[in-house]
Amino acid sequence: MFNNQEELLQQIQLGENSLFELKSLKFRGNQVVGPSRDKLANEIAAMANSNNGVILLGVDDKTREITGIPPEYLETVDRYIHEICNDSITPPVRYTFFHIKLPDTTGTMRVVFKIEIPRSIFIHRSPEGYFFRQGSSVREMSPEFLARMFQQRSQARIIRFEEQPVSGSSVDDLSKDLWQRYTTRSDELTDVVLLKRSLLATHENKSITASVAGVLFCSKNPEIFFPNAFIEAVRYRGERQNSNFQIDAKRIRGPLDQQIEDTVTFFRKNQTVGAEKRPYRVEKPQFSDLAVFEAIVNAVAHRDYSIHGSKIRFFMFDDRLEIYSPGSLPNTITVDSIHLRQSTRNELMTSLLAETPVAQSIGDVGRAYYMDKRGDGVRIIMDESNRLSGKKPVYQLIDDSELLLTIYSAKTS
């Protein structure tokens, strides 16, 4: 949007509209003092709540004069915008920015700050409330308007969330060697093939974007669009979650099947393996490989990716393994019936995992693909773990928003 100097200059002369906002900046010392942090947060959140838009910093909205940003303040402005988008708005707003040079009335080239804000799948609250953009103005949402917005966007997140379009993305964000795993040879255009598999989606403005599932499975860097779609893996010494006793830690990112493979590798690297003589030597690991593999796959496949700010946590201790997965249990499943029933939050994602071959590094886990969709995963976790340690794993639902699975360690010595 407004991707070259000529388009920007033309739009500046036309003035603000529902997709375009101008702001001059004032500085005192090494700080931005105008516009205020709260006012700019309102503008940014309103744009994210409404439509794709651009905010141009360094242009007076009244005179449309290009005032620019002095070079010595560029880092200050970068930090100012980052803090507003991440700390002053809930949930944080995703944005991209560019430093661009435009000529002022004398022909002198001045640096302006272009912020591109995609329409969000969330509703964002800024310090002074919930706002949306109407024309060139920012309006506070009435209770009725806000309720309708929450209903519309919560439905978009709950009903086939993984098929929703990801604003600001395109087919170019998907890697061909990744998406070809889920398509057959066809003479049709790439967009058509990927739309049929729901790896691309049609935005309400009719543009074609990557879908949530497309990004999570076929982008080599899905964290660009979903910063919390990763696994926090930590091995602690002892039985307490204490950073002072942290032995190993890794933030595991990448396409979802890569996350599963890397987490299994982390697990095998960090578990203790003992040995028994009966009369020959028999190795005895802390945890069942099959059970932990199933638990990791389930966490990745069934977590709620619409919850901002939450990630899967994979914590290893001397006496247990804990896996925290964001989201409540789907439909009417409870922690007591989870081993008896089968249901899924992410139907498309589980289907894609059922088409993804298990990585060779993982070895033999009893099947060729990450999921078989028969609903055997939880039973394998329970039975294999109980057989090894003599204790059944425990599922707990925390605040109806996070599922915790605890697998107990076998005695290895």
Image (cartoon, helix red, strand yellow):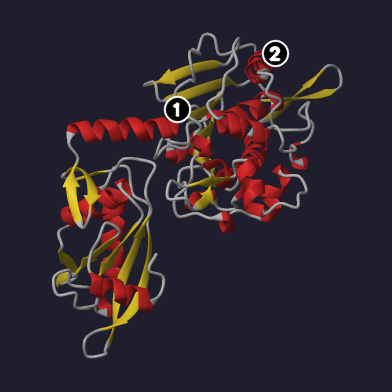
Q: Amino acid at mark 1?
A: Gly
Q: Position of residue 291 (x, y in %)?
A: 66, 23
Quarter of the image with the C terminus is top right
* Vertical placement of residue 231 versus 393, above or below: below
Can you tell which mark lies on residue 72?
none
Q: Position of residue 232 (x, y in %)?
A: 50, 40
> In which quarter of the view is residue 409 placed?
top right
Query: Relative to 294, is 16 on the left or the right?
Result: left
* Residue placed most toward the observer, 156 or 27: 156
Can you tell which mark lies on residue 327?
1
Q: Position of residue 264 (x, y in %)?
A: 66, 36
* Residue at the spot 52% in from the left edge and 42% down from the top edge: 212
* Residue placed most toward the observer, 255 or 100: 100
* Residue at the spot 31% in from the left edge and 40% down from the top edge: 123
Q: Residue furthest right?
A: 280
Q: Earlier in the sequence, mark 1 or mark 2?
A: 1
Can you tell which mark lies on residue 387?
2
Between disc 1 and disc 2, the foreground one is 1
Distance between the alpha carbons at the discs numbered 1 and 2: 29 Å
* Residue at the spot 18% in from the left edge and 32% down from the top edge: 143
> In which quarter of the view is residue 4 placed?
bottom left
Q: Position of residue 256 (x, y in %)?
A: 60, 41
Q: Amino acid at mark 2?
A: Arg
